Image (spheres, coloured by chain):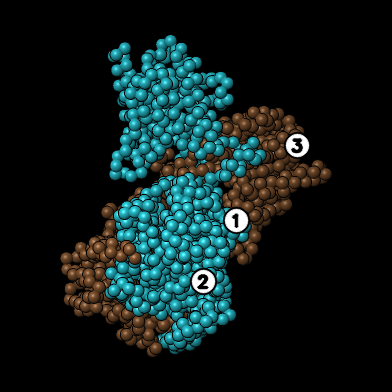
Chain colours: A brown, B cyan
Amino acid sequence: MALNSVETGEVKSSENMVVKRENGLENGVKRSPEVDLDDGIGTTENGVKKSQNRAVIVPKCRPKIRYSLLKTGLCYDVRMRYHAKILTSYFEYIDPHPEDPRRIYRIYKILAENGLVSDPTLSGVDDIGDLMQKIPVREATKEEILKVHSQEHLEFIEKTGNMTREQLLKETERGDSVYFNNDSYLSAKLSCGGAIEACKAVVEGRVKNALAMVRPPGHHAEPAVPGGFCLFSNVAVAAQNILKNYPESVRKILILDWDVHHGNGTQKAFYDDERVMYISLHRYELGKYYPGTIHGNYDQIGEGKGKGFNCNIPWPCGGVGDAEYMWAVEQVVIPLGREFQPDLVIISSGFDAADGDMIGQCHVTPSCYGHMTHLLKSLARGNLCVVLEGGYSLDAIALSALGVAKVLVGEPPDELPEPKKQPKAEVIEVIDTVMRTQSRFWDCFKTTQSNNGCDFNAKVDNTLMSENFPLQHAIRQQQLQNYTDDYNFVTLPLFDMGLPTNTVTCSPAIHEAESIIICVHDTPEIWAKRNRVTGLVDPSLSIVVDTAVHVIKWSVERNYGVIDVNIPQSLAEQDNYSAVMTSQEVILFMWDNYLKYFPNLSRLAFIGIGDASSGIVHLLGHRDTRNVVSSAILFLDTKPLRPLVPLVDESLADWYFKNSLVFASSEHACWGSDGSEAKKPRKKFGRVLKCDSDGLSNIFKERFEEATDFILDSFEEWSDTD
Amino acid sequence: MALNSVETGEVKSSENMVVKRENGLENGVKRSPEVDLDDGIGTTENGVKKSQNRAVIVPKCRPKIRYSLLKTGLCYDVRMRYHAKILTSYFEYIDPHPEDPRRIYRIYKILAENGLVSDPTLSGVDDIGDLMQKIPVREATKEEILKVHSQEHLEFIEKTGNMTREQLLKETERGDSVYFNNDSYLSAKLSCGGAIEACKAVVEGRVKNALAMVRPPGHHAEPAVPGGFCLFSNVAVAAQNILKNYPESVRKILILDWDVHHGNGTQKAFYDDERVMYISLHRYELGKYYPGTIHGNYDQIGEGKGKGFNCNIPWPCGGVGDAEYMWAVEQVVIPLGREFQPDLVIISSGFDAADGDMIGQCHVTPSCYGHMTHLLKSLARGNLCVVLEGGYSLDAIALSALGVAKVLVGEPPDELPEPKKQPKAEVIEVIDTVMRTQSRFWDCFKTTQSNNGCDFNAKVDNTLMSENFPLQHAIRQQQLQNYTDDYNFVTLPLFDMGLPTNTVTCSPAIHEAESIIICVHDTPEIWAKRNRVTGLVDPSLSIVVDTAVHVIKWSVERNYGVIDVNIPQSLAEQDNYSAVMTSQEVILFMWDNYLKYFPNLSRLAFIGIGDASSGIVHLLGHRDTRNVVSSAILFLDTKPLRPLVPLVDESLADWYFKNSLVFASSEHACWGSDGSEAKKPRKKFGRVLKCDSDGLSNIFKERFEEATDFILDSFEEWSDTD
């Protein structure tokens, strides 16, 4: 071709540029003064040999040989199976302790069965084939362990090596979920040493990544105390020693802890350390789940220099699975990890969130573990070390570890079995909270999360509040204006209750009405366009969805009297406790001071919308209103059911069940977390019905006709029986 | 150990389970009746041989050998360099056509230089080493091409093979950005055939994935017409033929087109086809960017059965880079791909969004191409085929292709060079729009996007509006109430303008004031907590940020008269055109009917907040107000600058520049998209200043003191000169 001559002239300059770029990219590694890089393509073979010979003498960090076929490292040593619970009864034999010595064997076995490891006898041979490479396990030295643990802690574990059976049983009894035998010390040192050696092999570039199948686990072992099946904090000890021995090439380590329990030990070891970012995904449930402290909450962000380098993602409930774990990893872990730019990633890899684990009761599949591993491989130039923590179903941990190992050696992850499943709403909420919390420290969350709602605790107090005003006041005022304009409504005074004068409004001459509909509702919802970046809502693109007006219109058309009660919500409360209380007081007040004195009133129906409807249930249990009240309709969506407490007469509960309709979303907690077994709420909650729609206004739209038919029937029936 | 005997008993059952699971996961493959799987570990070798022998005769889909070291396929053939522009002048030699034959050579060369390919002479040898495997390129058959293109189209391209130089030049002239020589037909058939063979090698499991370095590119070639340097739609032809020939194993294909241009040809080929999901990331800019039609917009979602299987991600501007591409891939492509569950992923891989490409003018780095490839590898069990499209900087495409190839062979992607950089706000906005649009079809976006703002066009019309009410009315009413309560404000009537009576409010006895501050503002912003899942804003957790009240307070303290003007925004408009008009009318009305008649008025200052401030600039150009107006302060954030049009007197523009402060965010478009060259707005826009904060209320807080100092100075100066 005519252009060939031009081509030739360009080769040199292009080659230079490429080499320059490669060097630039391997910058992190090159900082080490001891490193001599093999840049040329031909010298890779030598590079490997040199690094392996020297590794023993001087800790060296070698760049990975460019595109060579490095294997995945594997730590496994039968001696870590010696630590076991001393059996004291036949039942312990039948139903063994969950932290069972077979755990690591079963993982090794499944790797062999699937061709990842060549070891027909499963005895732990040295040459394990083309895909993985054995990393010999050694005991961690005392010096290494003391980088994390106290002298007393180490000495105590050491002593267990020479204790009598009785002493061991006593210590087992005394500890927080730990057991000891005379081999515990040896196994714990090997477990800790295995984690160190696996990380070393990765940062020295002898393997492309590593899987350390070690036990006893480590992440609950705090610097001064063992706990939760853990004796030494393996991952913390490994991280501390890597940071010490590779100061130039490993400056930052990311630890991702996907064990279903919070890794209190690891968190504590680095709580004020900005070199180690600790991220944990775990069941939390208001601190009730093991280890049962508030240290696992999202607001535990580190202290001192370590502020912003601790990130807890606390599940509010059990039963989470692939959708929630993928959401957390993709929304939080990867962006955070990418911005933190670690030199090494260690996964504290408990498999107790795995589908089938009876302790974790979660549903993470082996493919999901594979996908998460695949994502983590994109950080730290692939420097990834996976260290076993918990996981108590022998089948589940084997399959999960296989899912991880396949991806480590280079296979693509299997497809997720339920790709359409979406994370639970409360998990999305929690993860938003995590991102908002971390947005103080990390740019990746600033863009979309830092203005996501205001921090009311901070803002309610300060002077701003005097100038700004809560939106709900403005909305109620406008609502009132509309009712006055359209229906000549007037306000009904409440005395000495400290509520806004616009709380109760009603149709004219309400005291003379024969039939009355009372609508008790929360401040109406808003459909709003919220700017994703600034977090601001544009009022010109927002609409107030006034549900109550439908009730008013319907009632006015039938010449019924109407009372509209707006219960203001509390700015600062999560559970809306004070709104519930207010509603109860207001409705009781209205009965005691107005309704029971209205001379013509013969038929009364309640319609409740949202939390505010609790006042209705409260009244019906605390007064006998049956001579006028014919029915009560509650639209709850996902708001809590309220039980009728029959203070006046036991038969009230039956009456309530017969004369009420309670509309709940299909997502309402009352149906049970497991969709399969149809849990039915008890009678005292009224006649609870499952709706197809979600959201208060949608449920209202879906069921309003049914509600009004029910009221009309009850009014007629009431007239008949009267 | 005591537990060994128990262990042995379990081996069998565990083995069975594992095998069953593996079969389950390879289900997609097993559906093919022609496939015989080699389940055992020992028979993999045979499996490979069989598949390779038979592949020629019967199209077969073989499962990948479990954990074998499959290579990455590579298509490259020097004959695809024969298609070249016929040079008609010396200038075309100096400044060659961007779709340059050297493009594929340069990619092949950089792969060889970096050890991915072993081919010292760069001649296209058969054995290219341990990492990649040559996929021989052949001409696509007419039958294959006709699966996408019309007979006429094919015949026309065929004819170019025998045209004279003059005819070729005439056709080159006539076409839409295409050129022809006598080898164009051959090269185009090879390019097309290369894409087919690369996909075949992947789906037959002969390679783990593939890179097809082919040209001419294909994605602009529509079924009946070539265009945009493209003759045959290579990827579309490959996809159609794979679907035809592997009906059991390949039922769905995902095409991701990350070329900087919209792939109109590919989109058209599958617009009504639910078997192929087409996702394109491209510059769009209101349809002005090549190919310059609305077909690349986000609302082009497919038709008929293909509805929801076309997804455009249109960049609103140039200059996007890693942050935007990663955001799009992670927020849209991967969730969509995971839910779609393709059997094969094809990347239409133009590298013209690469940093350094003079046509694309974007900044995607080689590491970002690596990261995106890594993410795509997690779909379709790793069945990934990358096919070259555009990309016109020889250096940039070589480096970009290297970034992709490294990840294909199994290397982790390099770290992103600017991990802290966040996507542009307008890109986040666009991608939210894409997700909202696609949420009609895909569960992955339903959870968080389907209720993100209401569809006003749909809702404003219907009856709902009569019952619901716009939020801004409620807010203004409350604002007025506050001013009346705190400062005895009264309303100032506007006659015959069709505006709410609460539009203008002022301090008492305003007609007697000597000094007046006029604050003209949009409806105040809201800090709101928006539920991520339901999309609803909770009014009880929302606060109205009343900025204007600071102006009022400050003025009242100094005994100045104050006029507060609230300009209502339009519900349905994007550009706020009618609000701008309203503001201009209102301020002009106030001058003509009130201000110029106030007997004592000697000093007047304007403070504008948001779009509403345009009325101030309008007045200052349309009337000579200089005898009383001393200064104008505008808080704009990112709202458009408004030029003063000096209708009365040319000197007004100078006066305005001297007596105004215009506060704009550092993100304001007036500073130019490129931060490096400080663009300065012209004088007619007033004295525009860059603020550190973002958001109207933050900018207001940052600069309010400076603004009031400026007003005080101007008032004094005014008094002095008077």
> Residues at marks 3 and 1, common chain?
no
Upstream in the sequence, badge 2 or badge 1? 2
Mark 3 to mark 1 CA distance (whole Å): 48 Å
- The mark lying in front, picked from 3 and 1, is 1
- The mark lying in front, picked from 2 and 3, is 2
User: Observer-nearest residue: A110 or B22?
Assistant: B22
Circle 3 is placed at which residue position? A558
Mark 2 to mark 3 CA distance (whole Å): 77 Å
The furthest residue to the right: A720
User: Observer-nearest residue: B592 or B566?
Assistant: B592
The number of numbered badges drawn on the structure is 3
Mark 2 to mark 1 CA distance (whole Å): 29 Å
Picture coordinates of residue A494, whole percent (x, y):
59, 32
Q: Chain of mark 2?
A: B
Left or right: B119 in relation to B30: left
**Residue B666 higher or lower than B534, as above or below:** above
**Residue A439 higher or lower than B56, as above or below:** above
Point 60% across, 30% down: residue: A481
Question: Which quarter of the rendered picture does the N terminus of chain A lie within?
Answer: bottom left
How many residues crowd mark 2 within 10 Å: few (<14), some (14–19), many (20+)? Answer: few
Label 2 residue SS: loop
**Residue B386 higher or lower than A162, as above or below:** above
**Number of the label disc, if any, that sits on residue B141:** 2
Q: Could you tell me the amino acid type at mark 3?
A: Arg
**Number of the label disc, if any, that sits on residue B303:** 1
Point 38% across, 39% down: residue: B668
> Residues at marks 2 and 1, common chain?
yes
Q: Could you tell me the amino acid type at mark 1?
A: Glu
Point 49% across, 70% down: residue: B140
Q: Residue A666, located in which quarter of the rendered image? A: bottom right
Left or right: A361 in relation to A437: right
